Image (cartoon, rainbow, N blue to C red):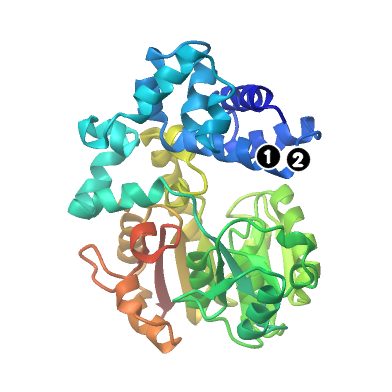
Amino acid sequence: MHPKALLEACADLVGLVLKFDHPADQVVSRFFRDHRELGPRERATLAETVYTVLRKKLLFDHLSPSGSGSKERRMAILGFHGPRDFLKSALNDTERRWLDNCDGVKEDDLLERHRHNLPEWLVAPLKAQLGAEFWPLVRSLQQPAPLDLRVNALTDKRPDVQKELAQAAIPAAATPFSPWGLRIEGKPALTKLDAFVRGAVEVQDEGSQLLALLLDAKRGEMVVDFCAGAGGKTLAIGATMRNTGRLYAFDTSGHRLDALKPRLARSKLSNVHPAAIAHERDDRVKRLAGKIDRVLVDAPCSGLGTLRRNPDLKWRQSPQSVQELTAKQTAILQSASRLVKAGGRLVYATCSLLPEENEAIAEAFGAANPDFEVQEVAPLLTGLKVAAAEGLCAGGDAGTRYLRLWPDRHATDGFFAAVWNRK
């Protein structure tokens, strides 16, 4: 595609995404469906340009007024993903001089807000938790996330799949913590690989894999994934159960559960039972009260631990939306806990960085439910042969009680998990 046409397409897509009417990935997917003439390289440029704009929006808002043309075009120029010479061939002389001036701005000369590119309401809680580590986190959040795969432990072994990917010219490194994980640089076309088609691998962040591992579901047990969504953790749990027992995948969205069906077919699992529920107090839930060995509550949350993948979330969430989520999280955890039988395990998890969605929810639940005994996560992970388990739980007053994953420390998405056993 001609540089000018590609830049105009980038500007059009940036304009659509910055409306924040819908999640950025949905807007990008819709744009690609409406422009099927775009090839893989053009799509990659468009997507990465949009995500760069979202990651550095405050900085680009600061720089763009000095340029010319529409704001969408200026933002697209600043975030353009590709060689500078290619981009400059699409610009006029004024725009080239402006871009050179912008490129010459030194980070140390910028205001703090233009360096961290985070909404102010999010900065204070992160600084309070992290102190000097706030800036390493900021730098990690402004980088794209690597691509993690989970090897289907039911059907394949990680070294074998690693060799198979290498033969397809896709180097993959074993993840440092998850025994099922492989990490890939770049974004190869995985869906055409035999390993993907036959269900040997699924795309899943290493942190998400650790949540499934932490549930430690056994053969023959009754297990519930209470907020299953598209089922990434469900499939990992089913594999640990060796396709035995009964695994319920509950979610209030039938649409999300529909996305599980093709993945479930590839996985070779027959012990998974997806079920749409109306709410956390649904009759299906009541009928299983006190009967379930293990329950995972991967609760709806702000998603702020996934900003490397979903940078629009920092602009689409607010203190008010987080407050609404914490009320929902409290209710869901309480309802899900009723499923757990005596001696059973309950895991509460989010992909949020905020204490009010994490430690605060866990502490309040523990205080209100003395029949649930909190379990130290570090020893549990050590028993599951996870390397350096204490380092996955560092930070905060709770010490090693809770799982706390950070993108800058662990190269995963940001995750939290708390574990209880019912007395």
Disc tally is 2
Q: Residues within 10 Å of mark 1 (few under 14, many from 20)?
A: many
293 or 321, nearer to the observer: 321
Please indicate, yes or no, whether residue 344 appears anywhere in the rendered image. yes
Please indicate, yes or no, whether residue 221 appears anywhere in the rendered image. no
Q: Which residue is mark 1?
A: 43
310 or 322, nearer to the observer: 310
Q: In the displayed structure, does residue 117 sit left or right of residue 74?
A: left
User: Which quarter of the image is occupied by the N terminus?
Assistant: top right
User: Which quarter of the image is occupied by the C terminus?
Assistant: bottom left
338 or 157, nearer to the observer: 157
157 or 214, nearer to the observer: 157
Q: In the displayed structure, does residue 15 sit left or right of residue 253?
A: left
Tag 2–tag 1 contact (CB < 8 Å): yes
Q: Position of residue 353 (x, y in %)?
A: 36, 52
Q: In the displayed structure, does residue 221 sit left or right of residue 91?
A: right
Q: Position of residue 98 (x, y in %)?
A: 40, 18
- Which amino acid, by three-letter code, is at mark 1? Arg
Q: Quadrant of residue 228?
A: bottom right
> Where is 356 relative to 391, above or below?
above
Q: Quadrant of residue 104?
A: top left
| Residue at the image position 21 percent from the left and 36 percent from the top | 108
> Where is 281 relative to 16, above or below?
below
| Residue at the image position 38 percent from the left and 85 percent from the top | 382
Q: Position of residue 359 (x, y in %)?
A: 32, 59
| Residue at the image position 29 percent from the left and 29 percent from the top | 105
Tag 1's secondary structure? Answer: helix
Residue 39: image tag: 2
- Which amino acid, by three-letter code, is at mark 2? Gly
Tag 2's secondary structure? Answer: loop
Q: Position of residue 142 (x, y in %)?
A: 40, 45
